[in-house]
Each structure stands twice: as C-alpha cells, then as structure tokens.
Image: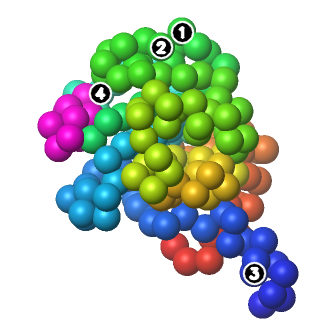
Amino acid sequence: MNKYLDKFKDFFQPNEVVKNIHEIDFARLKSQGITALIMDIDETLIPRTFHDVSPEVFEWVVARKEEGFKLCLTSNSRHPLRVKYIGDTLNVPSMSLGLKPLPFAFWKSMETLGSKPENTAMIGDQLFMDILGANLVKLYSIYVKPMTPETFLPRIWMRRAEEWLLKEV
Ligand SMILES: [Mg+2]
C-alpha cells in the first residue's frame, strides 16, 4: 500500500474493534490503567431512533460503575433534551453537540471525569467522529460496530468509507 495512504489510515485505526459494548473486556482495560470511559450514545449504547434506555444498557452502566469506572456520555447529537434524559436516566454526566472529532468535547469530558488521556477510553461507533477524535487527543479508542444497519444514503456511504479505512476487522 502507498505509504502516505497507510499513514493517513493510521489516524482512523482504533485500538480495539468489538461487535458491541458487551464484548469489551473491562478487567483488561482496568489492568491497562483505564479508569474513565467516554461513551458515544447513538448506535453505541442505543439505536439512533430509540428514546429510552434498555434494561440491559442500564445494567451494563451500573456494572461499569461498580467496577470503579467513571463514565460520561459525549454525543454529537443535536437533540440536547434527549441526551440529557439518557444521561439522567443512567445517572452519568452527558454532553450534546460535542462536535467530535474536534478535541474540545474530549477535553471537556476528561475535565468532567477528572481523567487524563492515558487513563481514558473512548467507546463509539463512528471512525470519523469517535475514533479519529480519540486518536487525536491520544485516548484509548474502542470501535463498536453500529447497532442498526444504515438506510440513509449518505450514512451508507460513510459506513463504506469506514470499511475502506479500517485495516483489519
Ligand atoms: Mg454514534
């Protein structure tokens, strides 16, 4: 592969690829020194069209808290009330209009979590927002496969581009 293309693709490579949040090995993350989790919402925790949290996700968040992780929800969503409702339901801080992959949302989230890049993981379903942004501020990045197939053409193209960028799946 062209070495410049290869370097370009490096910006988008997550540290880990998982099928869903339940596949993540949190004991190992903890042993790596990760104590704080920045979570994307849409298609990572709940499908984009859902407005409430499933019992499974609620239990998943409670389990992480019991393991000692600090969490915050950091979304690019333009629906602040929905994001706040989900954050309040899960009893974790939340942020909408994050403008990921710009670094501000990640910096602000780390401030909220009281964490540093070396002990923070970003968990999200979009290479162009969650993973690129996390890599730029040097967080541990975990790419979760989106929960539902895309039906909107620009998003289908985006997923194709993600597949092309990912070096290994
Ligand atoms: Mg998402």
Residue 87 within the magenta-colored segment of the rendering: no
**46 lies left or right of 162:** left
Mark 1, secondary structure of its residue: helix
Residue neighbourhood size for the residue with mark 3, other residues' Cα within 10 Å, grouped as few (<14), some (14–19), many (≥20) = few
Instruction: Give the Cα separation between the discs numbered 4 and 2.
Output: 16 Å
Which corner quadrant holds the N terminus? bottom right
Residue 65 within the magenta-colored segment of the rendering: yes
Residue 52 position within the rendered picture, expressed as x and y whole percent measured from the top left:
38, 19
Q: What residue is disc 3 on? A: 6
* Chain part drawn in magenta: 58-68
Residue 132 position within the rendered picture, expressed as x and y whole percent measured from the top left:
66, 55
What's the residue at 72%, 72% (across, down)? 9
Quadrant containing ligand 1: top right
Mark earlier in primary sequence (4, 2): 4
What's the residue at 62%, 25% (across, down)? 77
- The amino acid on which the numbered mark 2 sits, given as a three-letter code, is Lys
Q: What residue is disc 2 on? A: 84
Q: Residue 99, located in which quarter of the rendered image?
A: top right
Q: What residue is disc 1 on? A: 81
What's the residue at 81%, 78% (across, down)? 5
- The amino acid on which the numbered mark 4 sits, given as a three-letter code, is Ser
